[in-house]
Image: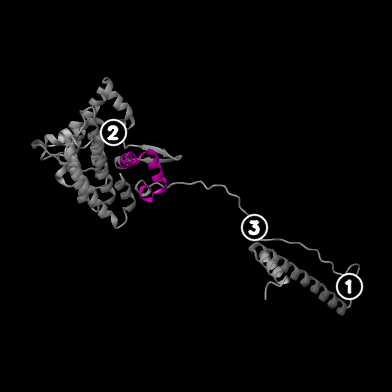
């Protein structure tokens, strides 16, 4: 678990490759432990850790598909020992982990080693415990639009075009999905399982029946995360299951790696705090009394008297402007704290504390 959490943080650092190699080596070694010594919960924890570390720290698709191959050996076991190690519960976890890693592989880089995958998932689609996970896996594979990389052609299909092959496989899947849905209406255990995953199951059925893209959304801190691809839905389910509901919500709001993965931009409401507003412009009005002008008719004044009156008026106005500017300067200094500082300096000087 700790390696998985660390992987999310070091994904873009030089330590990512070191963590990938150390973790994959340790996990594959622990998976070889005899079934009696390894509890089911411990087995699931190892598989999920392998998935999360590979997803975030693997440097190329070869490394990712190598981890997928380790997981596939348990999904489709060839030996009795491996088959006995996998229960119905752990098998669903294995499928979802394999799908999670597939979402990191570029579709043109999918190697042909997976050509039996669709046939095996069709088999698991018939099983009560794995039908939901297998249905989602098939939907993810079809979304990649490279079904020929996951299916072994029979002799009668060798000359079939890609579109023909895709349609052929799609009809087989749809027929099995409709059959499973009908059984879910009558079989109590299967019905309960389908009720728990009703939305996803319906999306899978509609995807193959009407080519309808899935639409999945969840709300985190009153913000909606909307997903419209099987790839992103698979990633969300796996990471949320790995971290836990509450912890995933925190990662989604704070971790840039997770935000970038789901193209999620968190919105934070600014808290209302008291703010001191200061005017950018102060308007001060003053009235100026001009002596000797009242009651005099300007037309009766001589040129020298008019000149003298103008000079007196200009002098009074200039003095008023100077007084006004000084007052503004004082206000500005008080806002910046200079006024208080000057008062302190004056007080200190008054008491002879400064030399």
Q: Judging from the image, what secondary structure is the residue with disc 3 in?
A: loop
- Of the numbered discs 3 and 1, the one sitting upstream in the chain is 3
Q: Which residues are magenta?
A: 235-258
x, y (%) of residue 308?
Answer: 85, 77
Disc number at residue 137? none
Q: Which residue is mark 1?
A: 299
Structural distance between the alpha carbons of marks 3 and 1: 49 Å
Q: Which residue is mark 2?
A: 204
Structural distance between the alpha carbons of marks 3 and 2: 61 Å
Q: Is residue 143 left or right of residue 255?
A: left
Structural distance between the alpha carbons of marks 1 and 2: 101 Å
In this view of the protein, which residue sits in the foreground, 199 or 165? 199
Residue at x-position 38% and y-position 40%: 226
Q: Which residue is mark 3?
A: 278
Q: How many marks?
A: 3
Q: Are marks 1 and 2 in contact (CB under 8 Å)?
A: no
Q: Is residue 256 magenta?
A: yes
């Amino acid at each position: 678990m700790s390696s998985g959490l660390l992987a999310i943080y070091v994904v873009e650092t030089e330590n990512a490759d070191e963590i990938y190699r150390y973790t994959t080596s340790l996990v594959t070694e622990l998976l070889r432990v005899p079934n009696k010594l390894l509890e089911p919960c411990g087995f699931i924890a190892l598989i999920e850790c392998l998935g999360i570390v590979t997803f975030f720290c693997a440097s190329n698709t070869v490394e990712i598909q190598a981890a997928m191959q380790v997981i596939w050996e348990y999904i489709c076991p060839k030996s009795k020992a491996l088959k006995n190690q996998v229960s119905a519960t752990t098998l669903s976890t294995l499928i979802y982990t394999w799908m999670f890693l597939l979402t990191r592989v570029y579709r043109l880089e999918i190697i042909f080693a997976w050509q039996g995958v669709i046939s095996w998932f069709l088999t698991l689609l018939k099983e009560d415990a794995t039908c939901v996970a297998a249905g989602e896996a098939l939907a993810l594979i079809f979304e990649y639009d490279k079904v020929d990389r996951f299916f072994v052609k029979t002799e009668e299909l060798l000359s079939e075009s890609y579109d023909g092959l895709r349609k052929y496989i799609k009809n087989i899947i749809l027929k099995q999905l409709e059959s499973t849905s009908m059984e879910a209406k009558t079989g109590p255990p299967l019905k309960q399982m389908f009720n728990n995953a009703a939305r996803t199951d319906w999306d899978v059925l509609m995807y193959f029946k009407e080519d309808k893209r899935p639409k999945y959304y969840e709300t985190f801190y009153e913000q909606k995360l909307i997903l419209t691809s099987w790839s992103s839905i698979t990633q969300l389910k796996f990471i949320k299951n790995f971290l836990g509901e509450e912890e995933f919500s925190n990662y989604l709001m704070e971790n840039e790696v997770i935000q970038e993965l789901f193209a999620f931009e968190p919105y934070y409401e600014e808290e209302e705090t008291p703010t001191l507003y200061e005017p950018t412009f102060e308007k001060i009005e003053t009235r100026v009394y001009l002596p000797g002008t009242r009651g005099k008719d300007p037309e009766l004044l001589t040129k020298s008297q008019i000149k003298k009156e103008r000079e007196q008026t200009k002098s009074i106005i200039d003095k008023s402007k100077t007084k006004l500017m000084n007052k503004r300067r004082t206000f500005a200094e008080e806002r910046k704290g200079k006024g208080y500082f000057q008062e302190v300096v004056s007080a200190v000087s008054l008491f002879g504390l400064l030399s």
